[in-house]
Image (spheres, helix red, strand yellow):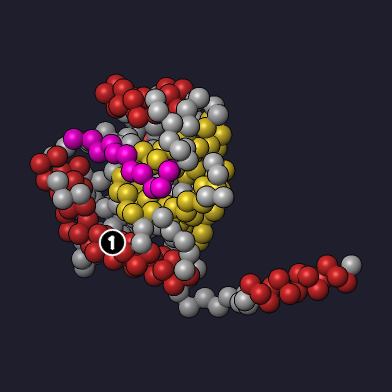
């Protein structure tokens, strides 16, 4: 049995030093806390996949701050790092500060990473100057060529804008354009799942025959219980764990607890197993 484990982080919205996101959110602190918790947990991690909106305003300094936190944690985890563009990111600064490729300029960032026998395809769905997502014909041709040959353990496609039907007018305006074409391209291939972000709310969909996982946002979460006609962000940072075991994908959303929160309970796995077995024996 082979398992590949990905730490899926999205919508970090890192700002420059001395600022807080929306005047109240320490987004870099959220990122540091998540990475510290994952390292401390001993959670197996083959790759850290960051699906866009890494910087809130595309500032070079924000990317440098993010990289200075992510890459030391990746080294401790012995994990690869995969950076993706989001609509808040700026291509030139992204390439220069995260990929050490200042000559790339405003070119889209599409890449393939191999994690053992698992293939991870990063797609740039951003449209400079706009918040909606799409990919062009050249990207479709490139994607088709990559998928023509199956990978030994299948493929995960990662992008920022989820290719799912829009639930309202706002999501239609900022969502993925022509999602049906992308799903048709993926159907019948070895793609096990699509990982996305953008919506600041964890969600799962089956579109065609493709499983789409939208990770919860690291910076803050959208409140689905806000009054009609209102949008509300909540300080509830989240991230995801993606496990691929012999082609079966399990996505788990994990919420970062408030600092200082006391756990409801805390015990060893051995103690929990003891209690479960004792309960079973009693019945």
Residue at the (36%, 62%) spot, across then down: 78
Query: Residue 161 in the image: x percent, y percent?
Result: 39, 38
Quadrant in the picture for the C terminus = bottom right
Tell which of 100 and 217 is nearer to you: 100
Residue at the (18%, 46%) spot, across then down: 95
- Mark 1 nearby-residue class (10 Å; few <14, some 14–19, many ≥20): some
Q: Is residue 26 above or below residue 59?
A: below
Query: Residue 181 in the image: x percent, y percent?
Result: 42, 22
Q: Is residue 173 above or below residue 274?
A: above
Q: Which residue is mark 1?
A: 71
From which residue to which does the magenta span run?
Answer: 107-118
Which residue is outermost to the right? 283
Query: Residue 73 in the image: x percent, y percent?
Result: 33, 65
The quarter of the picture where residue 87 lies is top left
- Is 65 left or right of 4, judged from the image as shown? left
Query: Residue 115 in the image: x percent, y percent?
Result: 39, 47
Q: Is residue 162 above or below residue 44?
A: above
Residue at the (39%, 25%) spot, across then down: 148
The quarter of the picture where residue 179 lies is top left
Is residue 79 inside the magenta stretch? no
Residue at the (43%, 36%) spot, across then down: 151
Residue 61 seen in the current view:
yes
Residue 20 seen in the current view:
no
Of helix, strand and loop, which one carries label 1? helix
Tell which of 39 and 64 is nearer to you: 39
Which residue is outermost to the left? 103
């Amino acid at each position: 049995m082979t398992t590949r484990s990905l730490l899926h982080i999205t919508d970090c919205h890192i700002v420059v030093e001395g600022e807080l996101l929306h005047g109240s959110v320490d987004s870099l602190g959220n990122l540091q806390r998540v990475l510290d918790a994952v390292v401390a947990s001993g959670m197996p991690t083959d790759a850290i996949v960051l699906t866009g909106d890494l910087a809130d305003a595309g500032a070079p300094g924000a990317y440098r701050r993010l990289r200075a936190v992510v890459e030391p944690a990746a080294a401790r985890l012995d994990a690869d790092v995969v950076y993706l563009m989001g609509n808040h990111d700026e291509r030139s600064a992204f390439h220069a500060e995260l990929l050490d490729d200042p000559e790339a300029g405003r070119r889209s960032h599409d890449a393939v990473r191999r994690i053992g026998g698992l293939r991870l395809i990063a797609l740039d769905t951003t449209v400079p100057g706009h918040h909606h997502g799409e990919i062009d014909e050249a990207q479709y041709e490139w994607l088709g060529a990559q998928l023509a040959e199956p990978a030994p353990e299948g493929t995960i496609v990662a992008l920022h804008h989820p290719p799912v039907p829009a639930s309202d007018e706002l999501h239609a305006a900022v969502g993925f354009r022509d999602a049906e074409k992308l799903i048709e391209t993926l159907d019948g291939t070895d793609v096990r799942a699509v990982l996305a972000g953008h919506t600041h709310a964890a969600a799962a969909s089956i579109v065609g025959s493709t499983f789409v996982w939208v990770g919860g946002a690291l910076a803050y979460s959208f409140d689905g219980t806000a009054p009609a006609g209102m949008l509300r962000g909540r300080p509830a940072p989240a991230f995801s764990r993606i496990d691929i075991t012999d082609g079966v994908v399990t996505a788990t959303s994990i919420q970062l607890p408030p600092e200082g929160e006391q756990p409801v309970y805390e015990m060893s796995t051995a103690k929990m197993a003891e209690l479960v077995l004792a309960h079973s024996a009693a019945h």
